[in-house]
Image (cartoon, coloured by chain):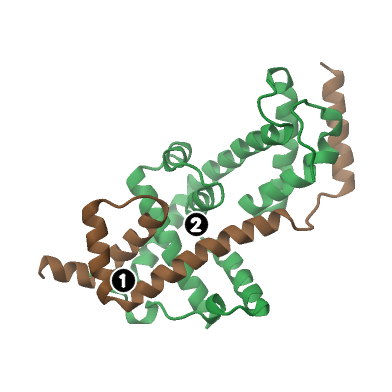
Amino acid sequence: MSYLNKIIYNCKQATFLIEKKQLGRLSFREEIELRIHLAGCGMCVLYNKQSRVINHMVQQLFQDSLKNELKLDDAFKADLQARIEEGLGNK
Amino acid sequence: MITETTVLNPHKWVATYADYLYAYAIVRINDQDTAKDLVQETFLAALEKVDRFEGKSTERTWLTAILKNKIVDVYRKKSSGLAIASASKAAQEQDEFFEEDNGHWKAAYAPQPIAGMDDQDPLLKKELNSILQKCLQKLPALWNAVFTMKHIDDAATENICAELHVTPANFWVIIHRAKVNLRACLQKNWN
């Protein structure tokens, strides 16, 4: 298989580069290889788009869960504060 | 809103920060009992260090940093031993997504549109979110740790590698595999 064909068929490598690009930096060669691949591969274009949406969703999910109503129960808190007071007393 | 303070007042710690720290831990650990333990350990460890607090950060930031270290310890513990076996097993499974000889998508796993992603309908979005949560939980512990630290905490790659003992090359492999798995899991459970 020619070098060009390897780039054109290799979705595993292309998706690897997509992930690397989103969080870091590609070398010049990697950047060119990714562009050549995406120019001819609709599936990886879709992957690229979905991957970005997933990043966004994950971040949103974590931000939302910091605001959620999940709370520690009062007995646990009272006990914990008591242990802290005890620790302070020993200082 | 929590008031920002650069003075420590342990008498108010639990009332002011316990729920925040608990929520912080639970999204990263996904286990209520472990998260509870971590909150407790954080306060007790902080108590030991009270004398060394220099007032350079807020009380909340300082406590969160202590908790963060404890979370990394949990990640490390989880990703050693048995978890490594499950990680390499999942890595093999991921290779099923691509043809072995040329790396092309296998027909069964090729990306397809996932309606909930484009749609603005809040109900669909909510459903997709709950699928995403389940899919995240299915990731092997080490992948989940790497993925979470990078995407949620926006930690520097070098720090993640050092803290979780992975090489930079492995880091990118894990980031890639985690995402390919997540996306496939969403597609499979959505359609």
Q: Is residue B125 left or right of residue B151?
A: right
Q: Is residue A61 left or right of residue B84?
A: right
Q: Is residue B107 above or below residue B25?
A: below
Q: Is residue B91 left or right of residue B182?
A: left
Residue B139 at x, y = what percent?
51, 60
Quarter occupied by residue B135 = bottom right
Residue B151 at x, y = what percent?
52, 53
Which chain has been coloured brown in this picture?
Answer: A
> Which dot, 2 or 1, sits closer to the camera?
1
Determine which residue is flagged by label 2.
Answer: B140
Residue B161 at x, y = what percent?
42, 41
Name the subunit of mark 2: B
Residue B101 shows in the view: no
- Crowd around label 1: few <14 · some 14–19 · many ≥20 (10 Å): many
- Which residue is located at x 61 percent, y 78 percent? B120
- Which residue is located at x 86 percent, y 25 percent? A86
Q: Is residue B186 above or below residue B171?
A: below
Q: CA distance from mark 2 to mark 1?
A: 20 Å
- Which residue is located at x 40 percent, y 43 percent? B166
Residue B72 at x, y = what percent?
56, 40
Q: Are marks 2 and 1 in contact (CB under 8 Å)?
A: no
What kind of residue is marked 2?
Pro
Determine which residue is flagged by label 1.
Answer: B98
Residue B116 shows in the view: yes
Q: Colour of chain B?
A: green
Name the subunit of mark 1: B
What kind of residue is marked 1?
Phe
Instruction: Identify the element where label 1 is drawn.
Output: loop
- Crowd around label 2: few <14 · some 14–19 · many ≥20 (10 Å): many
